[in-house]
Amino acid sequence: MDQTPHLFFLLFLPIAILYIATGVLYLFDIEGGVDEQIEYTVSLPKGLPNNEQETLNVISPIVQPAEVALPADFYLEDGWIGWYGYKRQVYLEPSEDKQSAILHVKEHDLWHQFLLIHKGHAGPLFWFSAIMLGASLLFSLISGLVVAFAVPKFRKAAVQFTSLGFIALVVAFFIGG
C-alpha cells in the first residue's frame, strides 16, 4: 500500500507543533519580548507624517533603511506610525504636542518571533504553510468522519462525539464571552 499521502501530512508536523506551542503559551501570557531596543528623538516641525513616504523622509536622516531593514507591514492609526514584522518593529511614538517623537527600533527575541509567526506577521511563506496546515487538518478530520459514518459499527459513536464536540464548542463560546 502506498504511504505517500500519509507521509505528505508529516510535512506539516513542524509548523503544527509551532502553532500548538505558541498558541498554548500565548494563552498563559507568555509572549516573548525584545532582544534589543534603540530609541532616537525625532523633531517633527511639520507635525506627524500622514503616510509611509513622509515617515521614511522623517526617519531617513536618523536610521537608514539599509541599516535597519524595515518590516513590510506599515501602519498609521490613532497617532501610531511605523512598521511591524515578526523580526522587528520600527515606530514613532509622538509627544503630546505632536512636534517631536521617539523613534523606537525593537528587535524581537526568538520566542516573540515564533508568536508573531502564529499571528500571521511572518510573510507569505508562513501564511501559505498555515493555510496548507489548516487544509490538511480539515481533510484529515473530514476523511476520518466520512470513514466513521461509512462503517456501521462506528456510525453511532461518530454522531455522538461529533455532536458532543459541536455542543462543547457552542457552550465554550457563550461561557467565554
Image (spheres, helix red, strand yellow):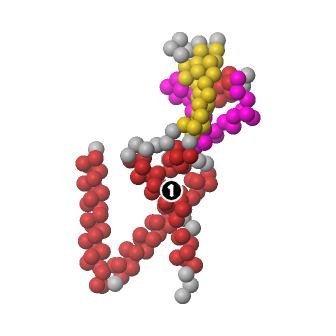
Residue type of the residue flagged with mark 1: Leu
| Residue 140 % position (x, y) | 45, 71
Residue name at image x 55 percent, y 37 percent: 34
105 or 56, nearer to the observer: 105
Residue name at image x 61 percent, y 51 percent: 124
Quadrant of the rendered image containing residue 72 = top right
Secondary structure beneath label 1: helix
Check if residue 72 falls in the magenta segment: yes
Residue name at image x 56 percent, y 72 percent: 8
| Residue 50 % position (x, y) | 61, 23
Quadrant where the image shows the C terminus: top left
| Residue 129 % position (x, y) | 57, 58
* Region of the chain picked out in magenta, as a range: 62-88
Quadrant of the rendered image containing residue 47 = top right
| Residue 139 % position (x, y) | 47, 69
Quadrant where the image shows the N terminus: bottom right
Q: Is residue 125 above or below residue 105?
A: below
Give the mark count: 1
Q: Which residue is mark 1?
A: 18
- Near mark 1 (Cα within 10 A), the count class, few <14, some 14-19 or many ≥20, is some
Q: Is residue 142 left or right of residue 54?
A: left
